Image (cartoon, rainbow, N blue to C red):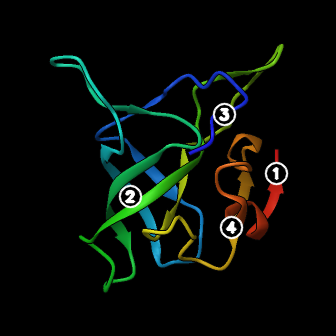
């Protein structure tokens, strides 16, 4: 997996609810785990923009509710550094992906952070805007 160009502050922990911004059928998901996180004792697993998380679908279509899925975080409210600038978004959002890292939906409604362009080029390809 490629490294990120920015210093991402991890602002999302387990239990955080995220908007699902694609058209896969999920509306709100809850983080239940972070892929590849090595933690210290009693420290919550944390994730930031561009990280893969395991989520449980809380609201959406009835056939996808209560399913465990993989997702990639595309926006976070916690600010992070991009060179000499600081970037933050107004909400926390993710999109559902499959095991190969390809998005399950065919379009993304909101904007996507520029940092995930190297890791997930297919996600950026279906995004409406990249910030």
- Name above or below for residue 62 compared with residue 81: below
Question: Which is more foreground, mark 3 or mark 1?
Answer: 3
**SS type, badge 1:** strand
Q: Which residue is mark 2?
A: 29
Q: Residue at coordinates 66% horizontally, 33% vertically from top-left?
A: 4
Instruction: Tell me how many marks there are.
Output: 4
Which badge, 3 or 4, comes first in the chain's sequence?
Answer: 3
- x and y percent of residue 21 in the render? 59, 63
Q: Nearer the viewer, residue 46 or 1?
A: 1
Which badge, 1 or 4, comes first in the chain's sequence?
Answer: 4
Alpha carbons under labels 3 and 4: distance apart: 21 Å
Image quarter of residue 109: bottom right
Q: Rate crowding at label 2 as few (under 14), some (14 to 19) or many (20 or more) other CA atoms within 10 Å.
A: many
Task: Residue at the far top: name it.
Answer: 84
- x and y percent of residue 69 in the render? 35, 65
- x and y percent of residue 101 in the render? 53, 64
Alpha carbons under labels 3 and 1: distance apart: 16 Å
- Name above or below for residue 46 compared with residue 51: above
Q: Is residue 110 left or right of residue 50?
A: right
Q: Nearer the viewer, residue 33 or 5?
A: 5
- Name above or below for residue 3 compared with residue 33: above
Q: Residue at coordinates 33% horizontally, 79% vertically from top-left?
A: 64
The N terminus lies in quadrant: top right
Which badge, 4 or 2, comes first in the chain's sequence?
Answer: 2
Q: Which residue is mark 4?
A: 108
Q: Which residue is mark 1?
A: 130
Q: Which residue is mark 3?
A: 4
Which badge, 3 or 1, comes first in the chain's sequence?
Answer: 3
Which badge, 1 or 2, comes first in the chain's sequence?
Answer: 2
- x and y percent of residue 77 in the render? 59, 32
**Callout 3–callout 2 Cβ contact below 8 Å:** no
């Amino acid at each position: 997996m490629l490294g990120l160009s920015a210093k991402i502050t991890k602002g999302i922990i387990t239990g955080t609810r995220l908007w699902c911004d694609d058209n896969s059928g999920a509306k709100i998901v809850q983080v239940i785990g972070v892929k590849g996180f090595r933690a210290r004792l009693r420290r919550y697993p944390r994730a930031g923009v561009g990280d893969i998380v395991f989520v449980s679908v809380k609201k959406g279509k009835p056939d996808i509710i209560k399913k465990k899925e993989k997702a990639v975080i595309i926006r976070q409210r916690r600010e992070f550094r991009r060179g000499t600038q600081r970037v933050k978004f107004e909400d926390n959002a993710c999109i559902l992906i499959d095991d190969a890292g390809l998005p399950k939906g065919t379009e993304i409604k909101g904007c996507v952070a520029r940092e995930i362009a190297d890791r997930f080029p297919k996600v950026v390809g279906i995004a409406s805007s990249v910030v």
